[in-house]
Amino acid sequence: LENQQGNRQNKQMEKCPRVTVCGYPLSIFFIVVNEFCERFSYYGMRAVLVLYFKYFLKWDDDFATTIYHTFVALCYLTPILGAIIADSWLGKFKTIIYLSIVYAAGQIVLAVSAIHDITDTNKDGVPDNMTFHVMPSVYEKQRSTFFSIFYLSINAGSLLSTIITPILRAQQCGIHTKQQCYPLAFGVPAALMVVALIVFIVGSGMYNKTAPQGNILVKVCKCVGFAIKNRFRHRDSRFPKREHWMDWAEEKYDKLLIAQVKMVLKVLFLFIPLPMFWALFDQQGSRWTLQATTMDGNFGVFVVQPDQMQTVNPILILVLVPVMDSIVYPLISKCNLNFSPLKRMTVGMFLAALAFVAAALVQLQIDVSLFKYYVNLNVPALFTLPISSDLFVLIFRVKFMILDEATSQTCVYEQTLKFGSSFTLLIPPTLTLGQMCQGIVEVTDINPNSVHMAWLIPQYFLITAGEVVFSVTGLEFSYSQAPSNMKAVLQAGWLLTVAVGNIIVLIVAEAATLPDQWAEYILFASLLILVCIIFAIMAYFYTYIDPVQIEAQFSQPEDEKKRKSLEMTKKDSIEKRKHSDSNSLYQTKM
């Protein structure tokens, strides 16, 4: 049967044209371009999503954060479903095509729904019917990293999209009223997702398409389920106890699979505290972005948009990964310090907690700088015109015209706003109408925010350092402690920890009644410190294993049986030969 399957795969490979470019199959470049466009689409849309919720849909910070993390959680849960569908029914190629169509359709719907003129019937710049402006649930297609260039395309797509999409969002567009251009910010990622789908389809003739052969995750779940069910059936004291509860699956599954499942469950048990790290980490796109909207992003040469601060993370990753691998880890090993993978992950959690302490300190300074004060001026006024910067734009220049209906004279007044600033313009009866509108008195109600966005860099540095130490090490540790054929199960477990972490954020955002944002940051930091201590205790009692040796213990008896069977066959043949020789000799003598 194995030979027949191998022959089928060889025939399929022979049908695929083997065109190479720079030593790589041409199909690799189709996949790399596809992945670059898809990552640009996903991270570009995600970068501006929370601002779209708050400033376009007019949701409050807590509700915007809740919906954002609900979406992210679904993005990390659906690949598990996609993998099961691909391996059990449709196959990888068809699954990617079908779900990519759903993906692209969702992006297009989001871009179209962001056009405020569609439902702005009274042309006041605010959509009148908010039911059309709903964030669609989209699938994030399953990906595999075969080459380093493939991983580079992922990071390049996410980095460029996080830089470019906020610039597109900051543009002014609209038919009746001009405002932030969310249709363009979502439209470009949607277009790139369509390009990604087209590129992937064009290269379809070069892919090696294999038929669905069953999903290992489903097989593991069935094995675990049978063990639990069988143990429950034999819960009476009359039945002898077994060494491990998974041994109750021996009636249906072979011992090698049970041993492999035991190793996987041992690693998955260590995954239980991990969601708390992701609960903090993924707030870069929600709470931290909203925090950046209350800060001054003017760096002199250029102005940084609040959602562009997220680019600090991928930039620091490109710097810190080689630094850690080439400098930090070798130095620690030279000092004869046992910096095991689980200890690294513990340090990563601690760094993430420190990042949120730093975020809380910055938030305290922001709250002080946003203090309101009022000035009373005894100026006889014709009327007052209050204006404020309730948008997150860092520098906002407004113009408005004053008309004297009696004389039909006009003048244009200009006012420069910075974030958080609020002014009241007092227009006296003696106003001289002309080009400059001389005589208008400007009263500052709220000072513009003075806390610079550069103060966010320390917390981004700490959270990125924690990610490098925690995430990379975590996956490396997981793969080293489980059989190679169980990597898909571990990847599913890892994605599940990210999803649960985002669910924790939305629960806290809705349930916590903390009056100040800095208090919420301290709450998350405290929870992670507590989880960090629990994980350190679990890691202390963990015993490292070698999966290859454990698997060899179960495969060795089979090899021994084959060897003994072979020896017995040889002995039988020798005995038969001797017996036939003796018979022939006896007949000759007769």
Image (cartoon, grey):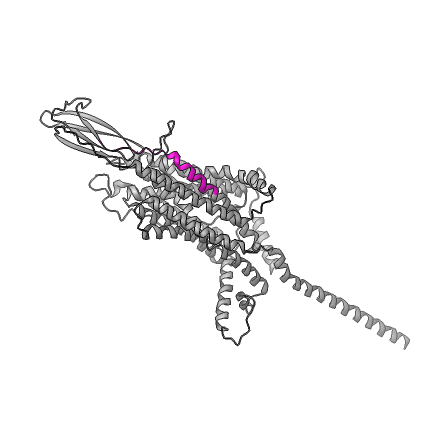
Instruction: Tell me: residue 403, above or below residue 224.
Output: above
Residue 98 in view, yes or no: no
Instruction: Tell me: residue 311, above or below residue 488.
Output: above
Q: Can residue 420 be found in the magenta stretch?
A: no
Extreme residue in the right direction = 589
Q: Position of residue 130 (x, y in %)?
A: 26, 47
**In screen coordinates, is 566 left or right of 127?**
right
- Count of marks overlaid on the render: 0
Q: Can residue 449 be found in the magenta stretch?
A: yes
Instruction: Tell me: residue 583, above or below residue 440.
Output: below
Residue 314 in view, yes or no: yes
Quadrant location of the C terminus in the rendered image: bottom right
Residue nearest the viewer, comparing 41 with 453: 453
Q: Position of residue 150 (x, y in %)?
A: 51, 42
Instruction: Tell me: residue 438, above or below residue 122.
Output: above
Q: Which portion, as a residue range, is magenta?
A: 444-465
Q: Position of residue 278 (x, y in %)?
A: 43, 48
Residue nearest the viewer, comparing 16 with 120: 120
Q: Position of residue 352 (x, y in %)?
A: 44, 45
Residue nearest the viewer, comparing 547 with 33: 547
**In screen coordinates, is 324 left or right of 97?**
right
Extreme residue in the left direction = 406
Q: Residue at x 18, y 26 (%)?
A: 440
Quadrant location of the N terminus in the rendered image: bottom right
